[in-house]
Amino acid sequence: MSKDQESLITADGLRYKTKEGGSPFKDSANMSSISCYKCGLHKPRALGVFRQMINQRMFLCGDCLTAKST
């Protein structure tokens, strides 16, 4: 987490009054970013390739692809 926030339970049982809702990957609905199976970081789909592994297509980012070839 980038910010430390206090987590206090209120009388009605709720917490995180100031916590922002939603996902950190706001554009994940249209799948413009996807996580690399090797490094786990989210990268744009255009900057990687899909490889066949264990009868499944897996995304490999460009950084991991170039590290493999060197």
Image: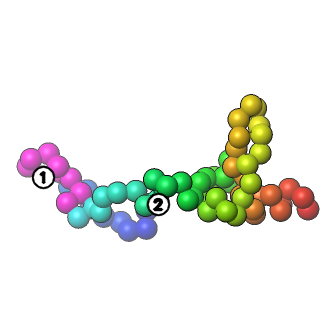
Indicate the amino acid at tag 2: Asp
Residue 69 in view (yes/no):
yes
Q: How many numbered callouts?
A: 2
Classify the position of the C terminus by image quarter.
bottom right
Q: Distance between the residues labelled 2 and 1?
A: 32 Å
The circle on residue 67 is none
Question: SS of the residue at dot 2?
Answer: loop
In magenta stretch: residue 38: no
Q: Looking at the image, which residue sits at the far left?
A: 11
Residue name at image x 35 percent, y 57 percent = 22
- Mark nearest the camera among 2 and 1 is 2
Question: SS of the residue at dot 1?
Answer: loop
Main secondary structure type of the part rendered in magenta: loop
Indicate the amino acid at tag 1: Thr
Q: Mark 1 points at which residue?
A: 10
Residue 38 in view (yes/no):
no
Q: Looking at the image, which residue sits at the far right?
A: 70
Frontmost residue, 45 versus 68: 45
Residue name at image x 83 percent, y 62 percent = 66
The circle on residue 27 is 2
Q: Quadrant of residue 43?
A: bottom right
| Rendered location of residue 27, percent (x, y) | 46, 60
Q: Is residue 10 above or below residue 18?
A: above
Instruction: Read off the magenta span.
Output: 9-17
Q: Quadrant of residue 5?
A: bottom left
Classify the position of the N terminus by image quarter.
bottom left
